[in-house]
Image (spheres, coloured by chain):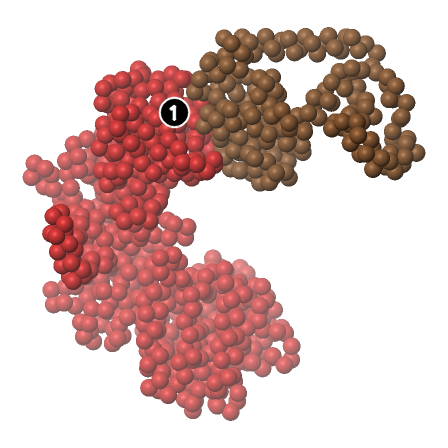
Chain colours: A red, B brown
Amino acid sequence: MADEIKIGAYLCTGCGIGERLDAGQMETTATRDGKAKYCKTHEFLCSRAGVEMIQKDIDDGETNHVVIAACSRRAKNDAFRFPTVALSRANLREGVIWIRPNDDESQETTQEMADDYIRMACAESKHMKVPQGSGEQQLNKTMLVVGGGITGMTTALETAKAGYKVELVEKTGALGGWAATYSKRIPVKANANAMPMDNDIDAIIAAVSEHANINVHLNATIAKTEGAPGRFKIEIATESGTGNTVEVGAIVQATGFSMYDPAKLPQFSSSNADVVTNMELEALAKAAGDGPIKRPSDGKEVSSVVFVQNVGQNSREEGQLQYHSGIGDLVSIKQALYFKANNGDDCDTTILFNNLRTPGAAGEDFYRSGQNHGVTFRKGIASGVDAGGSLKVNFKDMILDEDTSLEADLVVLDVGMVPNSGPDPYAVPMEIDEDAEAQNKADAEAAGTEYNRPVEIEVDSILNLDYRQGTDLPQLKYGFTDSHFICFPYETRRTAIYAAGPLRRPMDIHQAREDATGAAMKAIQALENAGKGRAAHPRSGDLSYPLFRKEGCTQCKRCTVECPFGAINEDEKRYPQFNESRCRRCGTCMGACPVRVISFENYSVDTVGQQIKNVDMPDEFDEKPRILVLACENDAYPALDMAGQNRINYSAFARIIPVRCLGSVNTIWLTDALNSGYDGIVLMGCSKGDDYQCHFVKGSEMAHYRMGKIADTLQTLNLEPERVATYEVAITDIQRAPQLINDMAATIEQIGMSPFKF
Amino acid sequence: MSLNNALVEKYRNNFLKEVQDNVEEGDWVKMCMQCGVCAGSCPLGDAWEHTPQKIFMMIRANKRDEVLTSESMWMCTSCYNCVVRCPRELPITHIMHGLATYAKKLGLAPKHNPTQWFSEQFWNNMLKKGRVNELKLGLSIYFKDGFASGVKEAMAHQKLGMNMMKAKRMAPMEFFGGHGIKDIGGLQKIIKKAQDIEAERLEANAK
């Protein structure tokens, strides 16, 4: 039964489709050109009666490949859900009648458009299979949490509370991390008189230690991580040498942050005992208890303190941090209030800021509280600290526009947070200019100073992933592990491995705990998905996975290199080895493969290629060009749908095919299209680069790279390079996306029809 | 020791505290977050030496003399634009007047500042009858630089004066005494008492 393809086509005439288009002709198209077994018309297909009609046909064995010619595949998903059959959709509403003017003149081309979409849907259906899952999936309800600081502990607790087991690995001999060293905390809910709140870290440590679902490994690191989501094998190495192996379904990395080394800032006299960082001040405050805070050099009670904000960060100077940690100002307000509480109201506390950042509603209240309690805030840029005799902070007052200074018993430096990341798998190796270095060495010798050859700083791996594409999580910027922070927070480029806390971006305890909870929820979702063989974000629930025809493979390794998620390893014979549960189903491997041996059950070189070929191609003298639009299903396709909803017209010569990601576009589709007489091709992907919006991170970038090389091919075919255009389109480009199609139509009018028509 | 010196001695390096203790609404100064909206909103901002934002910063930076001898607070026209716009809801206009009054009390207000002079005229004028005699107040401005220039000034505005009289907007008979409130003595006592209380408080603070 499964072998014979029985296409059942269903044509909806609701929403104006019946009035605008010739239903009879479309039925004929479906059965004659599309080779559908039958085509049934319904005036309201997404109604209960319509859906029941389809379901009955499926149940009766009348059809196993359903083609629905109605609205966009993005609409009425709940009604048209038939998981047991291959399903394809012809977009007659958003894609045809809503984007064409309703007049006699346009009628002919509009009808042709609709007929073509029906042919395409039937062709796609013919080459689709119902995704079955690989059968390799496993459900493992244990999670690995790396790092025993506030983030790791919160992740562990939240996971454990949800009924999952946790293996918590901490490098040091105790839980708590930085948070355990803090005297008090920034208040979570502040008011304009709020004081720092008590540090509740001990209670959290106790809760983690006592929880039956959490197994804590202290003095331990990860020696090796192999496998895939749902079946990770983790070798845990302990200091004592007694390693053990645990199996987990998902991983959360919460390795936190280190402080920027103040020794790199000699202009702030950072070697002076009375010039401390915020972290060092916490130790002084802890030591002081309820009594006055004393300065380290001679134990004098501090009667004046200056907090110098934003040093060595938000800087363009070499060796300093380019970003700002964002929470240092709240930390300093908290610590200034230590002095107001412990050293008395008369203790002169000045916070020297340039741009004060007190994020969140509580942050603003806490700032007011600092002001209310008499902390002086001065806007200025500090140039340095003089340590001869008493400490003197030199700064430029930015309001009064003058160079001035402040004397103090103690100076506190707000240095930035640096993420504890492992080595970036995609780091570009440092290039050393040997000639310049030889000159530097000679200069140093001539001047009698020490010459230091620049060296690449080695970072120890944290996860030791047994992945072909590196041992750790890929980084986004400045060493932070993050993905698009608005569109898909938490998602890393390694499926079921999540980053949480200050590893993703600088955070305070409150933010880190919220972040940890989010990561725990995502990781639970991921291990459950892995157990069912379903994809994670953004194709959540997708059961298809890359199938690979080994006989045809030439071992070119493009797929293993280009997979944005490191899903593909190599086996002993150097063939690609697909790990379906690491895969996000973007199809970038399919787009990369030069011999086209990679496909998905419901998305392959054929499902798209046959759609391209089944468009009815008018001959050269008809003056009816054909424009192929391959649009990313995440952003560009919805933008075009929305253009339809807004009744924005575009050329009736366009034939739009949604693709999973522009990265999945195989160049054979372009060659096929040009050979079969298409006059122009428009590719629409998401924005790429540092501020990427590509849901598969690198897919759009790969596509642009590949298309950059296609101009040569076009010229060898004697075709104008303008016939293929690649664009970055955002979901908000509702006006622009149709305009790009119209631009291509105008270009074709200018350069003429393709010579490849038959 | 003068009151001013006593206060300097008392507050030494903490002018902000001096302002908080002694200036009307001075307690608000510490809450300024230096956004500069007041400076940008002031219709006369360009004409000032120091905008409110700067005045507040100078207070925090212990610039006592510069603040108290500044002409800036005297230039405030009480349009209340800054008060309406201040995101921290500081009563900026009131603080400006408070600072001006404080400077005046300590004898630090700029001597030749015209608004300072006018404020004094206004106050004294009001105190005599319990209400402002507009005619006399106007004339005192005309004749502020002596008789000759006053006559010249008045002649130049002759037509305006005639029109105001015709429209009953100016009562020339007010020149002779003018009318006042019922119990002027009572009012003067009230004000005297209030001034005494304030002076006592300041004296006490200076100790």
Residue A296, placed above or below residue A96: above
The residue positioned 27% from the left and 42% from the top of the image is A418
Residue A580, image quadrant: bottom left
Q: Label 1 belongs to which residue?
A: A349
Callout 1: chain: A
* Residue A320 as seen in the image, left or right of residue A104: left
Q: Is residue A528 visible?
A: no
* Nearer to me, A445 or A63: A445
Above-or-below relation of B57 to B43 = above
Looking at the picture, tell me which residue is in the foreground, A491 or B90.
B90
Q: Residue at x 55, y 34 (%)?
A: B50
Q: Position of residue A611 (x, y in %)?
A: 41, 76
Q: Amino acid at mark 1?
A: Thr
Instruction: Give the farthest residue toward the front.
Output: B148
Position in image of residue A601 (x %, y %): 32, 68
The answer to whether residue A633 is above or below residue A38 is: above
Report which quarter residue B157 is drawn in.
top right
Q: Secondary structure at mark 1?
A: strand
Q: Position of residue A505 (x, y in %)?
A: 33, 44
**Foreground of the two, A92 or A416:** A416
Determine the residue positioned at 50% across, 18% down: B18
Categorize mark 1 by other alpha carbons within 10 Å: few (<14), some (14-19), many (20+).
many
Residue occupying the point 61% across, 20% down:
B104
User: Residue A710 is drawn in which quadrant?
Assistant: bottom left
